[in-house]
Image (tube, coloured by chain):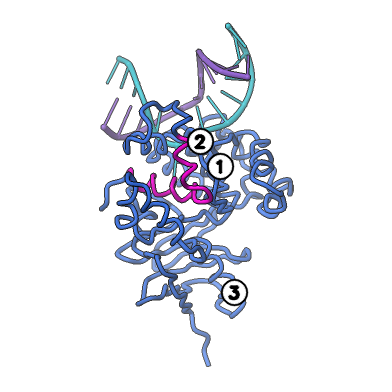
Chain colours: A blue, B cyan, C purple
Amino acid sequence: MPTSNDLFIPMPSLFSFDECIWFLNRNYDDCLHRVSDGCIVKTVAPGGELMLVRLTQEGAKIRAEILHGKNNASQKKLLEAYIRQWFDMSQDLAPFYALLKKDKTLAYMVKEFNGLRLVAIADLFEALCWSIIGQQINLTFAYKLKRRLVEAYGQHVEFEGERHYAFPSCEVLAEAQIDHLRSMQFSHRKAEYVIGVAKAFAAGEMSIDLLRSLPDMESRQKALTAMKGIGIWTANYVLMKTLKDGNSIPYGDVGLLNALSKHGIISERSDTEKIDAFFKKYKGWESYVVFYLWRSLAAKV
DNA sequence: CTCCAGGGCAAAT
DNA sequence: ATTTGCCATGGA
């Protein structure tokens, strides 16, 4: 009997595949996945094995087709775990929605963004590089920089005449030259930071397991910010996007402040008291409120 | 032309 | 301890 290339993952309650797709699509040109009517194609590397998968929704399940790569049972198991983490499928959103409903200003989000999950960047190294690239520049330009980096250093899978890229490994980027990144319009600093972080990963000085082994959020933040180019914003961003720490807040984030002021929660960007008071209402769900606030900044397509 | 983008660092107060 | 100048570029 031939092995099937399909994997079906049942969707949890309060889950919307369309909302997750919407987030991945937004208005930006992301080189690490393609979205076209209800379908996502992306390279992934669960367990270090490069694959190309296509995700669609079929009834109450997500169908993952393996377009390239191993399709044996153990690899499928890794792929399923990857997808469940990617879309935060193991989380029960009911408690979060209960908190939102108590908040007059944000209660509309339960209906408006129903089933939106905190979409992850599964790989810590990629998440760190991406946040360094995105620091202080507009996202359109940030995605351009990422594309140049990925197409220069990343592996790709060819499928139906198109190249699907994976984010470069730390070993490859550790050998990259600053001048080369400069020619891609990275600033000198950003080039240094990305290569420096790559070297730390390649040398085994930083890894997701290392972070997970640390007892609390503070020590994780400390370990991350010890690297050049990683400040508190970036540390919190990756703790939220990769480690799925429920209570990490990217303080000072421009988008967050804009969303808070747009909802009339703060009037001054420096009003830390009001910000603290706001997040107090969302203990344990701080990351999710931030994610939903970011979501609220973009018009629904 | 000016200002600001999903900040962080190092030098100067 | 807190503030300031700088980075690189594109879009509003």
Amino acid tagged 2: Tyr
- Identify the residue at image location x=50%, y=55%: A120
Label 2 crowd bin: few (<14), some (14–19), many (20+), radius 10 Å: some
- Chain holding disc 3: A
User: Of the residues under marks 2 and 1, which one precedes in the sequence?
Assistant: 1
Q: Could you say whether the residue bearing mark 1 is in a helix, strand or loop?
A: helix
Magenta segment boundaries in residue numbering? A275-297
Dot 3 falls on a residue whose secondary structure is: helix
Relative to the observer, which residue lies in front, A275 or A78? Answer: A275
**Lateral position of residue A83 relative to residue A173, left or right:** left
Q: CA distance from mark 3 to mark 2?
A: 38 Å
| Residue A165 within the magenta-colored segment of the rendering | no
Q: Is residue A257 left or right of residue A82?
A: left
Q: Amino acid at mark 1?
A: Asn
**CA gap, disc 3 to disc 1?**
31 Å
Pointer 1 local density, CA inside 10 Å: few below 14, some 14–19, many at least 20:
many
Say what secondary structure mark 2 lies in: loop
In this rendering, the answer to whether A142 lies above or below A88 is above
Question: Any magenta on residue A291?
Answer: yes
User: Of discs 3 and 1, which sits in the foreground?
Assistant: 1
Q: Is residue C6 left or right of residue A223?
A: left
Q: Which residue is mark 1?
A: A236
User: In the image, what residue occupies the spot 47% across and 41% down?
Assistant: A279
Residue drawn 56% across the image and 68% down it:
A81
Q: Amino acid at mark 3?
A: Gln
Which residue lies under the disc numbered 3? A75
